[in-house]
């Protein structure tokens, strides 16, 4: 079989084109091989059903495509000088069943809608795998949140002691962050899972194709309705994928950064499993958090994903080749899978220093805002003046090296005299209660707060959300499985026909 370029160009590809263009593109397309063959099988089956190609050609094509699917791209004896994977497949089919069959494989389609269809099937499947991993990660977080529902800890803002916190509340916050990723990626998935086949190069085709049939056989939700929009002209879904995955990576990196700080000796709030760490080549005492550093590095790299895809969309719509000749987005899926795998392992095996967390929860005036609230209630002062009084108390106590547990009415009255010119009527017991970290947590009653009843409520809500999300995922998996079975049945029916 002659090379595609022989008739028009009359000379073979130069070595530079083969090395820098054909080889990388073949590697990229080979990584999407399952999607590639599925698109070919659906296209050929539809053409046979519509009478566009002969039964003999359809049988020859389908039987060879099944062989290729079973044995993989290595069967093709790929020669990069021939060009894209499409041409490698055509050459192999021609060598097995003849030019008459191989020559009609590309009928009623172009590389433009074919490549877009392959990209969408692969991206759809890859997204669903990541969505499933996000849900599994959420489940791990939820299970740890249930363990940590009463673990008192210091909360930070500006990396300074802020207010007492509950570790289970923190875990549920992380659960909700990744629940938004789950929803965001599923929304992107719905826009990705559309059928590009039938757009052809630009204007559609005169052949009586059935786009609804290939939609059903490939498990898509619907055909893309405008033929120009089918191909490489409006690949904005790739930028959406990059955006959604980079936001997910940002959340994973942020969690890794927080645990990175908390696991340091100075904080000592949490400890990583030794199997996720490394050590120094010179300092034998070191336990380095390799796993967190890897996720942080991957998160940094992911920042460039969306700009790189937007760069592909900058061209006029008469140019589609920038996208075709790009490296694609395969690394986005691979990197995100790595980060999810690592962080799920981190959370599942994380050890906490519960006693130290509780000890530090109220150690550095993190309950001061509660004392201000008590002053407002008991003394009928406005909050700003109460804020000033407590601020003066904290400043004087730090200067005198007094802890929150050791101050009482005398110290508070001195601060009040200094700021508002009079003393207050609070007792030592009221002040001690107001500055107690456990009491602080128990008095938080606002919706979504760290109070025990609210944390318990959020745990129940997370369990309900997980159940609904898992059901949604099962339904989509089942729908795609049914479509794959329908494709296999369509192929089998054609191969079994006698005329």
Image: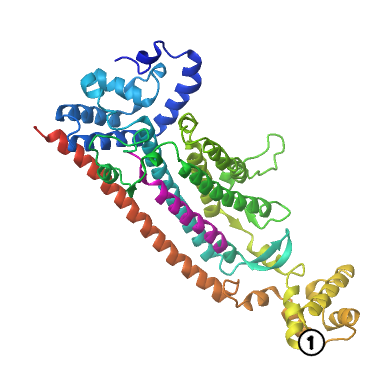
Image: 231 above or below 167 = above
Horizontally, residue 104 falls left or right of residue 363, namely left
**Residue plotted at (79% across, 86% down):** 426
In the structure shown, which secondary structural element does the residue marked by tag 1 occupy? loop
Secondary structure mostly seen in the magenta stretch: helix
Which image quadrant is residue 148 in? bottom right
**Residue plotted at (86% across, 83% down):** 413
Quarter that holds the N terminus: top left
- Quick one: 393 or 288, which is closer to the camera? 393
Where residue 72 appears, as percent x and y from the top left, is 33, 29
Residue 425 falls within the magenta-colored stretch:
no
Count neighbours of disc 1 (C-alpha within 10 A) and say few if under 14, some if 14 to 19, many if 20 or more: few
To which residue does mark 1 refer?
427
**Residue plotted at (36% across, 59% down):** 471
Where residue 40 appears, as percent x and y from the top left, is 29, 33
Specify the farthest residue to the top.
11
Residue 193 falls within the magenta-colored stretch:
yes
């Amino acid at each position: 079989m002659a090379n595609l370029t022989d008739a028009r160009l009359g000379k073979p590809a130069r070595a530079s084109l083969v090395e820098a263009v054909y080889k990388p593109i073949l590697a990229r397309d080979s990584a999407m091989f399952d999607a590639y063959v599925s698109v070919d099988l659906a296209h050929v089956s539809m053409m046979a059903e519509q009478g566009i190609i002969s039964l003999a050609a359809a049988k020859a094509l389908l039987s060879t495509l099944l062989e290729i699917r079973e044995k993989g791209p290595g069967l093709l004896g790929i020669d990069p000088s021939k060009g894209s994977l499409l041409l490698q497949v055509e050459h192999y089919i021609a060598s097995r069943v003849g030019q008459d069959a191989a020559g009609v494989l590309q009928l009623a389609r172009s590389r433009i809608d074919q490549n877009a269809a392959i990209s969408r099937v692969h991206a759809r499947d890859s997204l669903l795998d990541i969505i499933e991993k996000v849900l599994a990660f959420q489940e791990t977080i939820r299970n740890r949140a249930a363990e940590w529902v009463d673990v008192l800890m210091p909360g930070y803002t500006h990396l300074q002691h802020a207010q007492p916190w509950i570790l289970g509340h923190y875990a549920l916050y992380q659960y909700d962050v990744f629940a938004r990723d789950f929803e965001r990626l599923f929304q992107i998935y719905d826009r990705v899972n559309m059928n590009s086949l039938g757009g052809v190069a630009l204007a559609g085709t005169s052949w009586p194709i059935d786009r609804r049939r290939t939609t059903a056989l490939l498990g898509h939700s619907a055909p893309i309705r405008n033929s120009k929009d089918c191909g490489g002209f409006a690949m904005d879904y790739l930028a959406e994928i990059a955006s959604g995955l980079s936001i997910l990576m940002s959340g994973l990196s942020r969690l890794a950064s927080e645990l990175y700080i908390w696991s340091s000796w100075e904080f000592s709030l949490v400890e990583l499993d030794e199997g996720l760490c490394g050590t120094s080549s010179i300092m034998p005492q070191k336990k380095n958090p390799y796993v967190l550093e890897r996720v942080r590095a991957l998160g940094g790299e992911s920042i460039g994903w969306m700009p790189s895809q937007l760069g592909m969309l900058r061209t006029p719509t008469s140019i589609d080749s920038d996208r075709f000749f790009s490296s694609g987005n395969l690394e986005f899926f691979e990197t995100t899978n790595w980060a999810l795998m690592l962080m799920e392992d981190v959370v599942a095996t994380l050890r906490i220093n519960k006693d130290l967390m509780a000890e530090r929860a109220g150690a550095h005036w993190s309950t001061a805002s509660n004392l201000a609230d008590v002053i407002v209630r008991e003394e009928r002062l406005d909050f700003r003046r109460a804020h000033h009084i407590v601020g003066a108390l904290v400043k004087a106590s730090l200067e005198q090296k007094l802890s929150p547990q050791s101050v009482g009415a005398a110290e508070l009255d001195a601060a009040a005299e200094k700021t508002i010119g009079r003393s207050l009527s609070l007792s030592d017991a009221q002040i001690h209660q107001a500055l107690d970290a456990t009491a602080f947590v128990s008095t938080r009653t606002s919706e979504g707060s760290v109070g025990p009843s609210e944390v318990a409520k959020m745990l129940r809500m997370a369990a309900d959300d997980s159940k609904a999300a898992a059901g949604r995922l099962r339904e989509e998996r089942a729908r795609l499985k049914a479509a794959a079975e329908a494709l296999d049945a369509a192929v089998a029916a054609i191969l079994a026909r006698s005329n």
